[in-house]
Image (cartoon, rainbow, N blue to C red):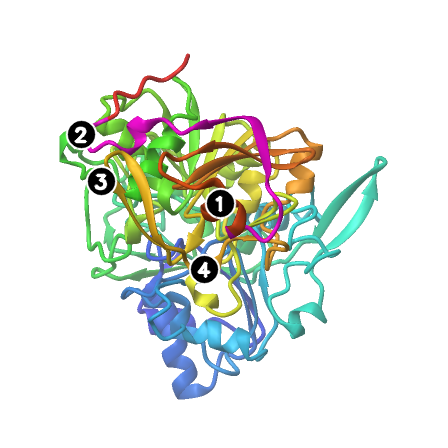
Amino acid sequence: MPKIVSAAEAVKTIPDGAVVAVNSSSGLNCPDAVLKAIGERFDHESHPRSLTMLHPIAAGDMFGIRGVEHIAKPGLIGRIIAGSYPSGPSTSEPPMIWQMLGANEMPAYNVPSGIMLDLMREAAAKRPGVITKVGLDTFVDPDREGCAMNAKAAAQPIVRKIRFEGQDWLFFPTIVPQVAIIRGSACDERGNLSFDQEGAYLGAMELALAAHNNGGIVIAQVRNVVENETLKPHQVRVPGILVDYIVEAPDQWQTTQTPYDPAISGEVFKPISSFSLMEFGTGKAIARRVAQEIRKGWAVNLGFGVSANVPRIFIEEGLHGQATWVIEQGAVGGVPLLEFQFGCAANAEAFVPSAYQFTYFQAAGFDCSLLSFLQIDRHGSVNVSKLGARPHVTAGAGGFVDITSRARKIVFSGYFNAGARMEIVDEKLKIEKEGKVRKLVNEVEQVSFSGRRGVAQGQDVTYVTERCVMKLTPEGIVLTEIAPGVDLQTNILDQSEFPLIVSPTLREMDRRLFEVEKMELKLHE
């Protein structure tokens, strides 16, 4: 029978040197009260020390839920392995965890979120590790960076390339957690956890199994404890037989800057007319062009950035429901939310545990993925995970590598360069001043998606910007469409560090993209 204790009492059970796995996605499901208690215990006792922290997706954010920042203290963290890290605007002070890993104070790794959850399943089953093709020829590959974020990590590799059945694979040896810290909405006195007021399940079950099956402890943070036999069996997502300690945190927030929104947890359904639409501008033109790539009935993955607005384009065009949106945190259907609430969806049709969602992504079970880019290079490779000058602006790769590893069709979207001053005038794009930062570069700073591997696998890859559309081909990146009002040489070819191939059938982008009125979008079957 689990014990109901304070957060301070629960964290006293964490020994020095423990491997600690945390279930979270930024503010979503973040067990913030327990993480805060770990930091406070360390401040008073200098224990626990030298923890290895495992975060399949980032714990905490830069908007009020501190998460991993509570424990970003020299001596407390001995090593950190995460799918992503808290991120925010470049004008903000970098989180302490970024300062520590940048200063090489402890080994820090960025491992794709799906692989992180696979490792938890391998640990739970006491298997030797994960063999995968996810990450080949990206920063995950030991031939590049091997997931290392600093020199100490590079000196202590956690992945190696192997030959198996005549093919190259990546092998991640199992990492066994001694402690799992998870969060739900409520639990009964026997420790059975429900997630009724959460916007995702994430990896709670996988982390709990991994720790429990290896003789470790499971700490569950919940909003409230209810009487036994008041939770229906189908409400229970983690059974009490896996839970050791229950921490009641009545003030826990549902997600970033959101104390509680019942539409996020699927308890109510908001009118479709209540969702905000994109304001007219160049970003909307990009999102509209991305929407033209989608076919009726497709299951479409969404990433953060301009493409996250495509569901709003569908709403405006009267097409809501003609494609199903799927996001890595687990929501299927509904309307994915924007900005600080990204990772949640309102009016979802289903919530799938993230581990299963990533299995779906890794094997390309979906039809198309809409993602952003920071840089594109001459091979067609994309960087979304690293900007050395402003590292905390990016969260790391998260599920990006899992999603793109075998995706049949990918549409990357973003602005052609950074900082350009432009506007739409009379259904034409007018570029008044070019940006100083080029995004089409000879070599990306970090390979998050391998263009060479994309070509080898026959993946359909499109790049959409405000001024042109490009396609990845075996010969290179081919310019296929140009925005009305844009000069081919000055505004496109001269703004790329590498030569673009101009298609002999180069055509103008659909002028409806640049109209204020809705574009009367029709999807192909």
The percent position of residue 247, horizontal first and vertical second, equals 32, 62
Q: Rate crowding at label 1 as few (under 14), some (14 to 19) or many (20 or more) other CA atoms within 10 Å.
A: some
Question: Which one is in front in this view, the residue at disc 4 or the one at disc 3?
Answer: 3
Residue located 47% across and 86% down the image: 46
Query: Label 4: which residue?
Result: 394
Q: Earlier in the sequence, mark 3 or mark 2?
A: 2
Q: Earlier in the sequence, mark 2 or mark 1?
A: 2
Q: Rate crowding at label 2 as few (under 14), some (14 to 19) or many (20 or more) other CA atoms within 10 Å.
A: some
Q: Rate crowding at label 4 as few (under 14), some (14 to 19) or many (20 or more) other CA atoms within 10 Å.
A: many
Q: Report the disc number at residue 120.
A: none
Q: Amino acid at mark 2?
A: Ile
The percent position of residue 487, horizontal first and vertical second, equals 43, 41
Q: Amino acid at mark 1?
A: Ile
Could you tell me if residue 512 is visible in this image? Answer: yes
Q: Which residues are magenta?
A: 495-518
Query: Label 2: which residue?
Result: 272
Q: Secondary structure at mark 2?
A: helix
Q: Does residue 176 sit above or below 293 in this rendering?
A: below
Query: Label 1: which residue?
Result: 492
Locate the C terminus by quadrant: top left
